[in-house]
Image: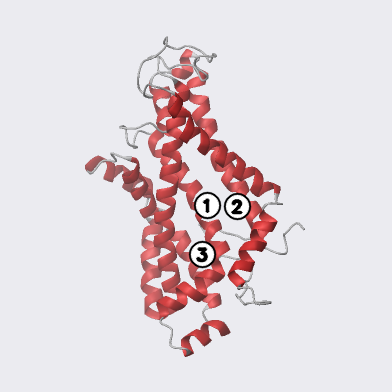
Amino acid sequence: MTDINPESDVVAAPSVPVATAVGGEPAGRRRVRDGLHFALRNKKVVGGSAVILAFLAVGLVAPLFFDYGHGEYVGPPSAPPSADYWFGTTTFGQNVFLQFAHGIRSTFLVGLLGGALAALIGMTIGFMAGYFGGLVDEFLNMLTNIVLVLPALAVLIILHTYIGITSVPSQALFIGLFSWPWVARAVRAQTFSLRNRDFVDLARLSGMSSGAIIRREIAPNMSSYLFMTFILLFGGAVLFAATLDFIGLGPTGSVSLGLMMNNAVHWSALQLGLWWWFIPPGLGITVIVGALYIMNVGLDEVFNPKLREM
């Protein structure tokens, strides 16, 4: 199993296959076809993907069936789950299910934006450090270590105090800026193992630029590893955002699963026995992150022939 450990300097991973054409079929197309073939037969990948798609469908489709907003007072206060209000209502008569659906939207958006930003920064730095080595590697490794040792939560508290997190994109920006160091180390280690391969030397001799070599020769041979890394970043961004929202450092102009739990605690839902207010968002975060982890384990089995189930 591929070991992606954010706390480790060295990332152990299976050897990366070199892309070659067989029987006239491009290697990239063949790799994608084989990957889909085994992914659709892996129960972890199929099950995790089904859960993620189900939550995404709820977040995108469910709000369309309501003619009022998630913050409007539409029902009796503190009503338990019923046919009219599937997840009950808050102490102010707000529909908890509608808030839950909107919260899923925010959860996926911050996961996508925060994970994508962290992946972009980490992979760029990792590729450059691993390919060029020398002074470039030393400088980028020093930068990575500086960000790695910064107390991210404390820095975010300070930034929130002076700047404020007013929207989901701004929250994703802060999360992405502090989530990339372990990605940089992982990609750097993989690039080190690929930069002296024969196909990279051949690309250099052909006059291809360093950037083109990284994009066309090295990155494609790490595509499965990079995809699995993004899944971990997605789940990490979801957890990070939920933590910030729960302690009151998230955007208050919208609703999220973490903010729902924050409001439930703030208005004494636990003491009042309003379990339907705080259990759905907490369970939703747990299931989403758990499904992403299961998907990652399944993809490891798909991409690693030693673990692959025939």
Query: Where is mark 2, residue-wise?
Result: 296
Q: Is residue 170 visible in the rendered structure shown here? A: yes
- State how the image is colored: secondary structure
Say which of 5 and 221 sits in front. Answer: 221
Query: Where is mark 1, residue-wise?
Result: 232
Give the amino acid at mark 3: Ala
Nearer-N-terminus badge (1/2) = 1
Query: Where is mark 3, residue-wise?
Result: 186
The residue that appears at 42% across and 31% down in the rendered structure is: 102
Q: Where's residue 186, x and y in %?
A: 51, 64
Position above or below: 230 against 22: above
Viewed as shown, does residue 276 lie left or right of 157?
right
Give the spatial CA distance, label 1 vs label 3.
12 Å
Position above or below: 251 against 150: above
Labels 2 & 3 near each other (Cβ < 8 A)? no
Q: Where's residue 290, x and y in %?
A: 58, 42
- Crowding near the residue tagged with mark 2, few <14, some 14–19, many ≥20 C-alpha atoms within 10 Å: many
